[in-house]
Image (tube, rainbow, N blue to C red):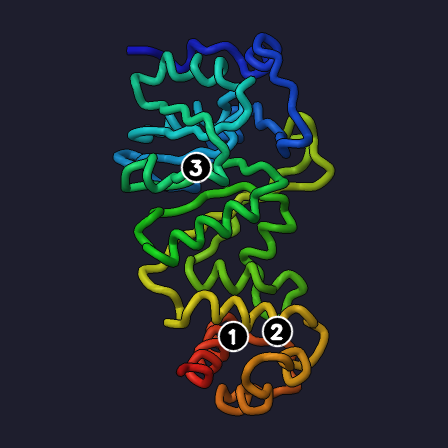
Amino acid sequence: MNDLASLPSLTQVIARFQIATKKSLGQHFLLDSGVTDYIVRFAGPLAGVNVIEVGPGPGGLTRSLLKAGAAQVYAIEKDERCLEALQQVQSVSDGRLQIVMDDALEARILDIVPSPRKIVANLPYNVGTLMLLGWLESVHSAPESFQSMTLMFQKEVAERIIAAPGTKDFGRLSVLSQWLCECRYDMELPPEAFTPPPKVSSAVVTLIPRAKPLVDVKKETLELVVAKAFNQRRKMLRVALKGLAVAPETLLEKAGVDGTMRAEQLDVITLCNLALIYQQLTAK
């Protein structure tokens, strides 16, 4: 049986294949296998699961996913400099590593990777939020798209995802994520955990899709109302919601919400119900 332990260190791999990180790709490599092994545990059991990894780079997290027993790891990488390093891991993976050279923002992941699927990834900083929004779109269309998503972001993005009402981080990303998923803050990593060290800390969060959204409201309606409510987050709702197709006073009264409150003071279900009332009032 081929042995992952026989692989050279990631530092040696980076030197051999000349994989210097590129700022334009938002790359920051995790080279400590103890850290990557620990991150993988947050994804839960991987036996029988096809795991999607975005931006594997030299393959540190990839090795940990294989060690954890993933049925298949689909490593999606757009940087062709990383191909040989990943092929080296593939050669000792017993056929469990599939390398997909593509831009994860454009790749048709649900077509490429069979179910059941989990995503485990150290996301590029510059496109992490955009990727999450795309995956949430898939979850909205079909909750079974992913069993879970264990993702690393800049700490400030992770905090927005799991933020509670009444906090400065609570906003549009919090509402959309928590409407569709149970969200958990797993761990924080300091800049020095990465090569090269970024200017900010990072954090891992896990999102587990709900069997159905918290409130049965159209996604585009929720996004419209929540965007309006938070665009002027320091203003009272009776002011912030002006410009919608329904007068704010009417909408707020129907929803039983005090118009002097601010969006950040409402919980996710109340904001979703506000959008549902708007949907009902504007239905033709």
Query: Residue, x 56% and y 70% (percent of image)?
Result: 226
Query: Residue, x 32% and y 55% (percent of image)?
Result: 142
**Number of the front mark, 1 or 3:** 3
Residue 107 badge: 3
Mark 1, residue position? 271
**Residue 262 screen position, x and y as percent:** 65, 78
Within 10 angstroms of label 1, few (less than 14), some, or many (20 or more) residues? Answer: many
The answer to whether mark 1 and mark 3 are in CB contact below 8 A is no
Q: In the figure, residue 69 lies in which quadrant?
A: top left
**Residue 229 screen position, x and y as percent:** 61, 73
Q: In this view, does 25 lie above or below 274?
A: above
**Residue 199 screen position, x and y as percent:** 73, 38
The amino acid beneath tag 3 is: Ala
Mark 2, residue position? 229
Within 10 angstroms of label 3, few (less than 14), some, or many (20 or more) residues? Answer: few
- How far, Cα to Cα, is label 1 from label 3? 33 Å
Q: Earlier in the sequence, mark 1 or mark 3?
A: 3
Q: Earlier in the sequence, mark 1 or mark 2?
A: 2
The amino acid beneath tag 1 is: Leu
Within 10 angstroms of label 2, few (less than 14), some, or many (20 or more) residues? Answer: many
Q: Is mark 1 on a helix, strand or loop?
A: helix
- How far, Cα to Cα, is label 1 from label 2? 9 Å
Quadrant where the image shows the C terminus? bottom left
Q: In this view, does 153 lie to the left or right of 270?
A: right
